[in-house]
Amino acid sequence: MSVHPFGRLADGTEISEIRLTNAAGATASILTFGAALRDLVVPVSAGPRRVVLGYRDLDGYLDNRRFIGVTVGRHASRIAHGRVTLDGVTHQLSLNDGPHHLHGGRNGFWRKPWTIVSVDETSVTLALDSPDGDEGYPGKLDVTCTYRLLEPATIAIEMTATTDAPTIVSLAHHSYFNLTPGKPIRDHVLQVDADRIVPFGPDMLPSGDLTPVAGTPYDFRSPHALAEGVAPEFSYDCCFVLNRTGDGPVHAARLTAPQGSVALDVATTEPCLVLYDGAGLGGDRVGLDGAPHGPHAGLCLEPMRFPDNPNQPTFPSARLDPGETYRQVTEYRFTV
C-alpha cells in the first residue's frame, strides 16, 4: 500500500491516489476525488492485465462527462425533472441531463473530494459529508466507500450512508470494464441473471412497467456476445431487474473475454444492474494506455436501486430515514 499526491483542486484541496496490492499480484488505484477506481490490474496467464478504463491526470476526472471509474450519488441514474417528494414536500434537484437529474447532479459525489478514514495493504475507506441541500437533496448525509482487494483478483466495494432527515439514496460504482484492453468490447460474452428489464423511453426515463427479456435484445439469460443478433449501430443502455431472493449478495452477471482468457463475475446486494456499453465514449483525453477512450472502449455493470423510483410508485423506494443505514456490497471477481 502507498499513498501519493495526484493533484490539487482550484481551492487548493489535495487529491490523493491510494495504491493497493495483494499477494496474488493484483493491484488497484483509488482516488480521493470522486472515490474513483482509477486503475485495476489482475494477474492472468499471459501476465498482468489492466481491466478498467482510467485517466492519466486529475484533469480527466474534472472533465469526466462519462463518469469513468467514479462513485455516483446521492442517486444513480435519472430522476425525472429533478423532482423528489417526501412527506408532502417537493424538493427540486439540480438538472444536468437536459430537463432531468443524472447521477447526483452537476457536482454529485463523483465530482467531490473524499477523505481517507483508514487504509492498509489491501483496503481503503473513504468518507464524504454531504450537507442538507446538496444538489437539492434534503438532509445531511454521511457516506463511506470501502474498497477491498481480495485474493486472488476481486475488488469488493462496500458503501454506506446515514442521514439526519428523510432523503433518498442510491449509490453506484461506475467503472468501465474491458477484459481485452485496447479492443472494443462488442465481442465480449455476457450473461445476466435477470428475467426482466426496466424499459426506458426516448428520454431514458422508465415508464414504471417491467418487461420480460424473452424475445428482446436484452435476453442475456444464456451467455452470448454483445454484438450477436443486433445491428452494428445498436447500443445497450438498459436496466436489468435481477433475479433474487432475500437481501444478501447474489450473482448478477458474468462477462467473459473473447476466447475465454479471463472472466468477470458480479455479485451484489442491489435489485438492479445497469448495462451501458460505452457507445458514447469519445474525445481527445488520453487514457491510462496512452490512447483516447473511443466508442465501446469499455462497458459498465452498475448495481443500483430502481431508476427514477421517487416518481414511479410501483418501484421500491430508495428512501432513507434517520436511524437507518443504507448499505451496498458489490464484488467484481476476476478469474482466469
Image (spheres, rainbow, N blue to C red):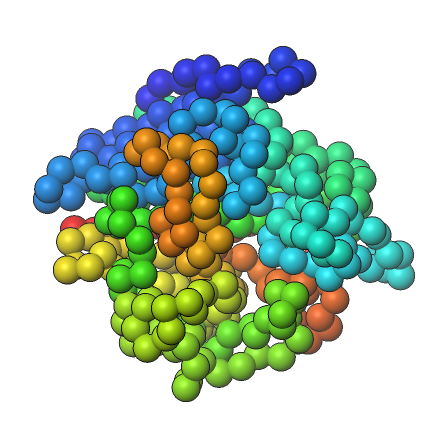
Indicate the position of residue 2 as horizontal and vertical percent values.
Answer: 35, 18
Q: Which residue shows up at 62% across the image and 46% down it?
A: 73
Q: Which residue shows up at 27% across the image and 44% down it?
A: 182
Could you tell me which quadrant the N terminus lies in?
A: top left
**Residue ranking furthest to the bottom:** 215
Instruction: Judge whether 51 appears above or below 11 on screen.
Output: below
Q: Which residue shows up at 41% across the image and 86% down it?
A: 215
Indicate the position of residue 324 as horizontal and vertical percent values.
Answer: 67, 50
**Residue ranking furthest to the left:** 45
**Horizontal relation, residue 42 to residue 276: left or right:** left
Indicate the position of residue 119 as horizontal and vertical percent values.
Answer: 42, 24
Residue 321 visible, this angle: no
Indicate the position of residue 253 as horizontal and vertical percent values.
Answer: 35, 63
Instruction: Judge whether 75 appears above or below 164 on screen.
Output: below
**Horizontal relation, residue 161 to residue 60: left or right:** right
**Horizontal relation, residue 126 to residue 220: left or right:** right
Residue 179 visible, this angle: yes
**Horizontal relation, residue 7 to residue 37: left or right:** right
